[in-house]
Amino acid sequence: MARKLITPAQAADALSVELSTIRRWIRDGKLPAFRVAGHAVRIDVKAVDALLTPIGTAK
């Protein structure tokens, strides 16, 4: 099955954070990303979903 990849801007929208935050998370290793076609950066949507924690389950 193919991965569903999104742009950093789409990830920022999905998580309601600034694009600079997504770039920092990628740089710091908190959010894995891939280079495609040389320079384009893409993020697996599952990695974005993994950052979402339902309210009441955080420890």
Image (spheres, helix red, strand yellow):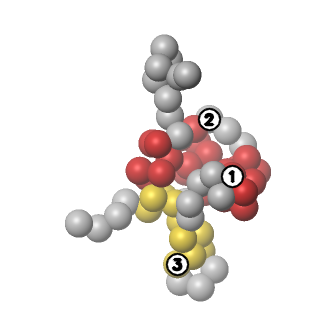
Q: Which residue sits furthest top? A: 56
Please identify, in this view, whether the residue under mark 3 or under mark 1 is nearer the observer. Answer: 1
**Which is nearer the N-term, disc 3 or disc 2?**
2
Residue pictured at 55% horizontal, 22% vertical: 59
Residue 25: assigned label = 1
Q: Residues within 10 Å of mark 3 (few under 14, many from 20)?
A: few
Residue pictured at 59% horizontal, 69% vertical: 41
Above or below, 25 relative to 41? above
Q: Position of residue 39 (x, y in %)?
A: 63, 80
Callout 3 secondary element: strand
**Which is nearer the N-term, disc 3 or disc 1?**
1
Q: Position of residue 36 (x, y in %)?
A: 52, 78
User: Which residue is nearer to you in this view: 26 or 14?
Assistant: 26
Label 3 – label 1 distance at C-alpha: 18 Å
Q: Position of residue 34 (x, y in %)?
A: 54, 71
Please identify, in this view, whether the residue under mark 1 or under mark 2 is nearer the observer. Answer: 1
Residue assigned mark 3: 36
**Residue 44 in sight from this viewpoint:** yes
Q: Residues within 10 Å of mark 1 (few under 14, many from 20)?
A: some
Q: Could you tell me the amino acid type at mark 3? A: Val
Q: Position of residue 21 (x, y in %)?
A: 73, 47
Residue pictured at 59% horizontal, 54% vertical: 31
Location of the N terminus by quadrant is bottom left
Residue pictured at 53% horizontal, 83% vertical: 37
- The reply to whether callout 1 and callout 2 are in contact (CB within 8 Å) is no
Residue assigned mark 2: 16
| Left or right relative to 20: residue 8 | left
Above or below, 12 relative to 8? above
Label 1 – label 2 distance at C-alpha: 14 Å
